Image: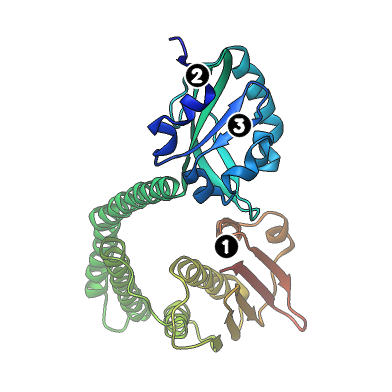
Amino acid sequence: MKPITFTTLEEALDNPFFTSSPDGIVVVDREGVIVAANGRLAEILGHATNELRGKSVEVLIATPLRATHRSHIGSYSSGPHIRAMGTGPRLKALHKNGEEIPVDISLSPFEAGGATYTIAALRDARLRLQAEEAIFQAEEWRAIIDDRQRIARDLHDTVIQDIFAAGMGLQALQRAMPPDNNLKEQLGASVDHLDSVITRLRKVIFNLTHGDDPEPIDAATRRVVTESLNGSGIKPTISVSPANRPLPARPQEHVLATLQEALSNVVRHANASTVEVIIEATDEVCRLCVCDNGVGMPDAAATRPGFGLTNMMNRAQVLGGSCEITPREGGGTTVEWKVPI
């Protein structure tokens, strides 16, 4: 397609496309020098139209992109053609105040008085990019919801049913035992524990399908400690600050899961009589510390951590934080888990 031809440059600049366009318009010659700009461009980028005339078009381009723009100008000048809005490279225009503004640009060559010029139409792309980001986030959230629904179905249809069946089997075994059998009471405690596991799983399923009901972090911490140490004889000391309000959902989910894993390790391996739980949260960081007075962590566990320790470390890593497990002065182990909020 041949470029549009005008008798003179003034005739081209009198065209309604230039004078009344809703887009910012800048006209440049083959060397990239600005010969005219419309009022809308002045509104978008803050430059008066007369102060741009005679300057390189690069004054309107963000500094990091100027070298790339020069190569595009060279290739475009050798074969001018119409380029529709949004089909070229992503550019940022430079406002007079120094702000970099994302823009969509269309190019169209024309001839006037025997010379070739290019009309560049600029459109502020901020609203479009915000809309695209909102759509992307909505699609991402939709995928998360679908995943949560699937996990909830799997928990309900398989895990809970299997635990329930195991509990029924233990109850039948308990009933068949003589009244004076020492294991009968232990079986009863195991059945009660399985019932509490099912209750917690049902709450997880509800939260997965209906959204989390934020629980104050101090209440949630005491609940996890009570459930994790139930029947162990280990005496806990709990310190949570700030109290009476939830953390952001994702850090709170991970800190409680990490606390549960750490306490489970204490109950199973530490042979401890006391454990101290500290949670401190600010606007920037959340810190969990679990200290026990047990036998300490074996050297092999430090070099080849098991699934539980690895899981705690992975949870911290996912949130850009850290997890350190060290010997406690005077005996025992300290788990310090820290993530940004």
Instruction: Label 2: state its secondary structure.
Output: strand
Q: Residue at x 71, y 65 (%)?
A: 298
Q: Quadrant of the N terminus?
A: top left
Residue 163 spot, x, y in % from top left: 29, 62
Query: Secondary structure under badge 3?
Result: strand
Please tell me the numbered disc located at residue 35.
3
Residue denoted by label 2: 110
**Sequence order check, earlier mark of 1 and 2:** 2
Q: In the image, what residue type sits under mark 1?
A: Met
Residue 313: x, y in percent? 61, 60
Residue type, mark 2 in image: Phe
Q: Which mark is residue 155?
A: none
Mark with earlier residue (3, 2): 3
Give the vertical position of 300 relative to 183 (above or below): above
The three-letter code of the residue at mark 3 reads: Val
- Check disc 1 and report the residue beneath it: 312
